[in-house]
Image (cartoon, rainbow, N blue to C red):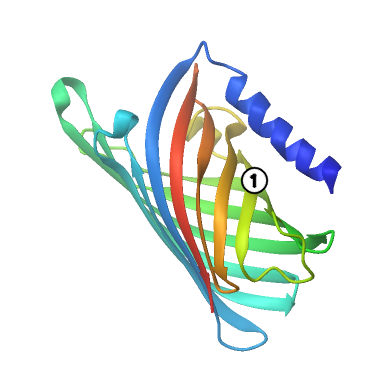
Amino acid sequence: MKKILTLLLLITILTSGKLFAQENRFSGWGALFHTQKFSDKWGMSFDAQFRSADHYDYLQHLLLRPSVNYYFDKNKMGALGYAYITTNGRGAGGAETFRPESRIWEQLIINTKIGKTSTLQHRFRLEQRFLGNTTNRTDHYFSQRLRYFARAVVPFKKTETFNKGAFVGLQNEVFANVQNNNKVNKHFFDQNRAYVALGYRLHKKADVEFGYLNQYIKQTETYVINHVLQAAIYTRF
């Protein structure tokens, strides 16, 4: 357990301090994640996210993402989903821009135990991205992206079952462009998101947390580091 948590923490530290000479941004994200089971095998998930522009100037991204889930067993779940993302921007002279994006995505989640109460989740996701026109651009294109996500939840209180109390959340996600990267940033590597949070489990079906997310973005010729303060709610029914 210590080796895994140390590795996740090192990724967070190294990613956040790697390229401070590059452009730095500061934003805030709010997120709601909900999972609903209908039976032992079937269920659904939904998340909504709201992301500000640099220095919290305006709402830059709105993301809505539902899915249908199939549970192979209590630790493995597959999903097929759709996502709709809006990107608002500001062009030269303050002109507003808008780009819609639709995604179809498939994923596999594997949950493992670390010790008695801590958990580690692995998530593999493949996205088919359909990006629409902006206000001042006429192009639209298709690309595919692969994402690997690992998240550890470590309760402060060591009990056989973790149904209530404070915890630390550690996670990292790597993004790779696997098709038409020349239309995105011209690179295989897309971005990395490292995150550490303090949370509280209200009961076994609901968590709240607040943390720092370091988004390291590879652009065509440079890098951007986005320093994000994130508040999130997780519900499970």
Q: Is residue 144 shown to the viewer in this render?
A: yes
Residue type beneath disc 1: Gln
Name the residue at 62% across, 32% down.
188
Which is nearer the eye, 194 or 94? Answer: 194
Residue 230 in the image: above or below residue 77? above
Name the residue at 68% across, 77% down.
71
Name the residue at 74% across, 63% down.
110
Taking the view exactly as shown, the residue that stands out farthest to the bottom is: 39
Q: Residues within 10 Å of mark 1 (few under 14, many from 20)?
A: many
Q: Secondary structure at mark 1?
A: strand
Pointer 1 residue: 171
Using residue 40 as the reference point, say whether residue 200 is left or right of it: left
Using residue 106 as the reference point, say whether residue 94 is left or right of it: left
Total numbered labels? 1
Using residue 129 as the reference point, say whether residue 89 is left or right of it: left
Instruction: Report x, y in % for residue 85.
Output: 37, 52
Instruction: Report x, y in % for residue 105.
Output: 54, 59
Residue 124 in the image: above or below residue 195? below
Q: Is residue 67 shown to the viewer in this render?
A: no
Q: Quadrant of residue 87?
A: top left
Instruction: Report x, y in % for residue 221.
Output: 49, 16
Taking the view exactly as shown, the residue that stands out farthest to the top is: 21
Instruction: Report x, y in % for residue 219.
Output: 49, 24
Name the residue at 55% across, 54% down.
199
The C terminus is located in which quarter? bottom right
